[in-house]
């Protein structure tokens, strides 16, 4: 017997109903099936890191700090900070040696 056949979205609490509306019923069912009874916290840091990488990449392509701030819903000061940190991290990253030169 497959329980998913009997799954109804209206049986979900508010949090899982939100998951179902964004990710689909199958995702909500999978979460309920595998993590029932657990408190599940989803941190925002992975998404924040992705936004920071996108901001720095677009900055390197010439997009202005102001435009980036508007696009990502951040203040210009925060975008400056993101760019400053990314530049520092890039400068500190070890350089890969070229195997084809003397």
Image: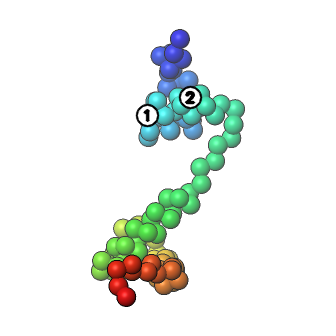
Looking at the rendered image, the quarter that the C terminus falls into is bottom left
- Residue 68 at x, y percent in the picture: 37, 73
Query: Which residue is tagged 2?
Result: 12
Chosen colour scheme: rainbow
At a point 50% along the width and 38% down the height, the residue shown is 19
Give whichever of 19, 52 is nearer the camera.
Answer: 52
Give whichever of 101, 62 is nearer the camera.
Answer: 101
Disc 1 or 2, which lies upstream in sequence?
2
At a point 54% along the width and 17% down the height, the residue shown is 3
Taking 62 as reference, is 78 left or right?
right
The reply to whether discs 1 and 2 touch (Cβ–Cβ < 8 Å) is no
Q: Residues within 10 Å of mark 2 (few under 14, many from 20)?
A: some
Find the residue positioned furthest to the bottom: 102
At a point 43% along the width and 80% down the height, the residue shown is 97
Considering only vertical position in the picture, is 100 above or below 46?
A: below
- The picture quadrant where one finds residue 44 is bottom right
Is residue 11 something one can see in this rendering?
A: yes
Find the residue positioned furthest to the left: 62
Q: In 3D space, how far apart are the residues under numbered discs 1 and 2 (Cα atoms)?
A: 12 Å
Quick one: SS at disc 1?
loop
Considering only vertical position in the picture, is 36 above or below 60?
A: above
- Residue 5 at x, y percent in the picture: 47, 16
Q: Residues within 10 Å of mark 1 (few under 14, many from 20)?
A: few
Give whichever of 31, 13 is nearer the camera.
Answer: 31
Q: Count every numbered label the image shows and give the total.
A: 2
- Residue 52 at x, y percent in the picture: 46, 69
Query: Which residue is tagged 1?
Result: 24
Is residue 77 something one can see in this rendering?
A: no
- Residue 2 at x, y percent in the picture: 51, 15
Mark 1, mark 2: which one is toward the viewer? 1
At a point 50% along the width and 59% down the height, the residue shown is 47
């Amino acid at each position: 017997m497959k329980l998913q056949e009997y799954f109804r979205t209206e049986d979900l609490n508010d949090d899982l109903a939100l998951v179902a509306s964004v990710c689909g019923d199958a995702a909500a069912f999978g979460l309920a099936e595998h993590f029932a009874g657990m408190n599940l916290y989803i941190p925002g840091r992975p998404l924040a890191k992705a936004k920071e990488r996108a901001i720095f990449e677009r900055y390197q392509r010439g997009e202005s700090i102001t435009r980036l701030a508007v696009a990502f819903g951040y203040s210009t000061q925060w975008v400056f900070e993101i760019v400053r940190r990314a530049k520092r991290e890039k400068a500190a990253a070890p350089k890969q040696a070229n195997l084809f030169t003397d």
